[in-house]
Amino acid sequence: MASGQRETGYEGLVVAGDQLAADAGAAALRAGGTAIDAAVAAAFVLCVVKPQSCGIGGYGGFLTYAPPGEPVVQLDFNTWVPLRLENPTLREPGYVDPPSSGGAAVAPMAVVPGLLAAHKRFGRRPLAEVVEPAIRLSRDGFTIGDRLDHYLLEHWESPNGVQPEFASVYFPDGRPPRAGEILVQADLAVTLEAIAAHGTEPLRTGPIVEAVCATVKQHGGFLEPEDFIDDDALAFAPPEKTTFEDAVVYGPSLQTSGAGVVFAALRHLRPDRLGGNREQAYVDELAEALRAAWKERTAAARAAGSKSNDTTHLCAADDAGGLASLTFTHGPSFGGGLVATGTGIVLNGGVDLFASAPGGPLAITNMSPVIVERPEGIRHAVGGVGGPRIPAIIFSAIVDAVHYGSSMADAIAAPHLSVRATDGGLECEPELLARLEPGAGELLEGFGPACGITQTPDGSVPGPDPRFDTGFARA
């Protein structure tokens, strides 16, 4: 029996895109925290150790949460159009893409208000304790892995050049640090300490906000202090939900997240035609359902989601039965490529996600953190990384878990498939492609780690992605 496990039989568990993040979440659980304490602790660590994928300067994300004994809820902490950005360039078919780097790419930050709104309602541990692992790793440093090594070298070689403040943080010796070396982010540690002590206030007004705005304006952007959100503006709401066979699937906004594609594909799927898992009939049926789902997405939304962005996802479960699925990002690799002077904050590249919508532009993404409930107390949490390929990966994971009775671990490990939003072309991982008729599909590239948890009253099963350096930890 895991340390801290209660008589319910439920088990505390965290699965994340990095082992250090999973460890931080599990530590929060061992201290008596909830799944939200664990998710928030892990998320802040991810902001430190995966700066290419996410950060406290991110433009937001989505959380789907099943509190113990209560209805499932969701929290949308996506971004919005800056007040001073007149006639915003939108990602429309046939038009030039808006900027994805530099000051003009930076949208209002919402990651910290979102995480703290979740902690305020559902957390039990003190905020300073939950943020402490991220503070320590930024102040004392952590060992760079192969993936961050790759992204740092790629950014160093960018034809657009490197902002001096970015270089001072990530290239302090005048070169990209390599795997095995220690990365210290001292300014970020100070910023995180301010958040731990004062919550969202340092990101609503004061020196950090002034530094962010000054950096953005210096590089051609539009942010003003008025663009920074009050944490009271964020609120949990009932999730979107649909049924598939004997399961209920919960997720975030169908309009602004990839759940819109996932839910539509589940509606179009004909389970009686699936056949064996990952056989030709399975692939054909899922591909047709995905094509139909993407056609329901507006042209502007398909265009807004056409770029594969770096993102991160994590899942957390506690010993009382709470279950969380959380995805968040700051857009392209290293966001907009800027670090706000003196803060250590990597600024996002969220402006390139805006698309036309009734009532004004919305940031439309493909993030799809969902929770699946089945009879007899079986629940799954799952989400993933990979821009427009996220919905297909989550869709197939749900089909595997519900129709075939797989755990999320097996569903995530199985070879992935996707359908391009632009032309409906089928893409498959090599193992799956080899099983199909010649010419039936193309090689699937440009996706990132998915992760999940299968939770039952008898325990929890982690679902890390074996393709990537992900991690999990039990409480």
Image (spheres, grey):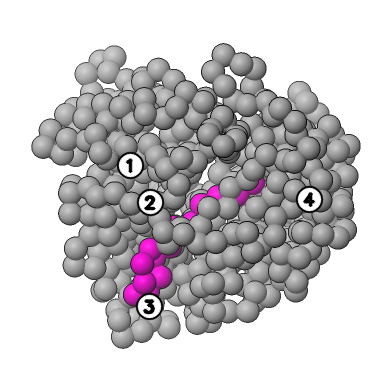
Quarter that holds the N terminus: bottom left
Q: Residue at x 85, y 43 (%)?
A: 215
Contact, CB < 8 Å: mark 1 with mark 4? no
Q: Nearer the viewer, mark 2 or mark 1?
A: 2
Q: Nearer the viewer, residue 474 or 455?
A: 455
Question: Where are the magenta residues, as a range?
Answer: 59-72
Contact, CB < 8 Å: mark 2 with mark 1? yes
Mark earlier in primary sequence (1, 4): 4
| Mark 1 crowd level (few <14, some 14–19, many ≥20, 10 Å Cα) | many
Label 2, on which residue? 240
Q: Nearer the viewer, residue 141 or 195?
A: 195
Q: Residue 263, labelled with which disc?
A: 1
Q: CA distance from mark 1 to mark 3?
A: 28 Å
Label 4, on which residue? 226
Tag 4 secondary structure: helix
Q: What kind of residue is marked 1? A: Phe
Contact, CB < 8 Å: mark 3 with mark 2? no
Q: Position of residue 352 (x, y in %)?
A: 64, 31
